[in-house]
Image: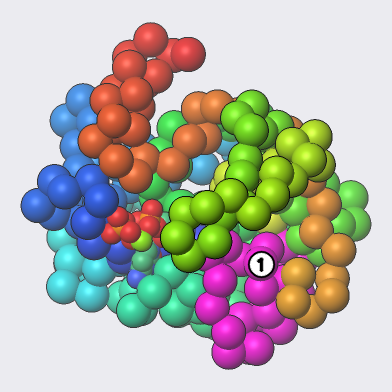
């Protein structure tokens, strides 16, 4: 139970279009954020969770996770700022922590074995670890008009999931650099630090669109 997990949950969920922050959208009556936090704690590798909530919903989110080892802080204007806020809180509240995970609230149904693989890889000495899947579609690069430029070799591409795991000092350094990225490993890459990969899982999909939400309901109910 060595790791502290940061959960960015301060997004507006515009692409889902549910009329509330995505973290609060219920699946089988339980908000996505609560599914995500329970999943992290149930994996048995995380001692505490720090959630970055929409600033107007800090009290509501605190009530949802009452009784669990979870702190809630106000998130920021983009994902990087929300993770940064949670990271500052975690470092102050848990000065002895060595391993930090960053996990999207939107990846609410991530299986515990993915959490375990990421923690194990950081504990074994990797400064940064991301769970990945092979790319099954052919991917094209296009120009501003949508005309195809080229076709990257699919065998060398991976889809990246969360939780991403870091040595705490490495993540602090990455977030001190002042740039933004769509994931935390992206910041670490800019430091020139190697980022290792472990196997992800299809159930760690990010709920972004109404289609994804329908898939998540099915995954949760049928345990696929
Ligand atoms: N996130 C965050 N703070 C922000 C923006 C995003 O903590 N200012 C979080 C989201 O809550 C989510 C994760 O980052 O758990 C991934 O972001 P995304 O899937 O884009 O969620 P939203 O930003 O909520 O969705 P959308 O972009 O459709 O509005
Ligand atoms: Mg977003």
Check the image and report above or below for 197 versus 35.
Answer: below
- Examine the structure image and report whether residue 18 is included in the region drawn in magenta: no
The way the protein has been coloured in the rendering is rainbow
Residue holding disc 1: 186
In the image, taking residue 220 as reference, residue 102 lies left or right, namely right
In front of the other: 162 or 139: 139
In the image, taking residue 121 as reference, residue 112 lies left or right, namely left
- Report the magenta residues as a range: 166-188
Residue at screen point 69% across, 49% down: 150
* Percent coordinates x, y for residue 184 in the rendering: 61, 66
Check the image and report above or below for 212 versus 142.
Answer: above
- Examine the structure image and report whether residue 178 is included in the region drawn in magenta: yes
* Percent coordinates x, y for residue 149 in the rendering: 64, 54
Q: Furthest residue to the left?
A: 19
Q: Quadrant of residue 57?
A: bottom left
**Residue 86 seen anywhere in this rendered image of the structure:** no
In the image, taking residue 84 as reference, residue 63 lies left or right, namely left
């Amino acid at each position: 139970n060595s790791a502290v997990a940061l959960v960015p949950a301060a997004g507006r969920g515009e692409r889902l279009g549910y009329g509330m922050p995505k973290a609060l959208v219920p699946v089988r009556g339980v908000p996505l954020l609560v599914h995500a936090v329970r999943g992290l704690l149930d994996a048995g590798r995380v001692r505490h969770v720090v959630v970055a909530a929409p600033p107007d919903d800090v009290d509501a989110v605190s009530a949802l996770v009452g009784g669990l080892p979870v702190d809630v802080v106000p998130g920021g204007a983009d994902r990087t700022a929300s993770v940064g806020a949670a990271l500052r809180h975690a470092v102050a509240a848990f000065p002895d922590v060595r391993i930090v995970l960053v996990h999207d609230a939107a990846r609410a149904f991530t299986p515990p074995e993915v959490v375990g693989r990421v923690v194990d890889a950081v504990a074994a000495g990797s400064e940064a670890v991301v769970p990945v899947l092979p790319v099954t579609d052919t991917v094209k690069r296009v120009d501003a008009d949508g005309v195809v430029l080229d076709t990257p070799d699919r065998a060398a591409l991976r889809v990246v999931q969360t939780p991403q795991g870091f040595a705490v000092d490495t993540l602090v350094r990455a977030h001190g650099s002042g740039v933004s990225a769509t994931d935390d490993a992206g910041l670490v890459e800019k430091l020139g630090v190697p980022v290792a990969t472990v196997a992800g899982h299809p159930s760690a999909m990010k709920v972004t669109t109404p289609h994804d939400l329908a898939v998540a309901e099915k995954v949760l109910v049928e345990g696929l």
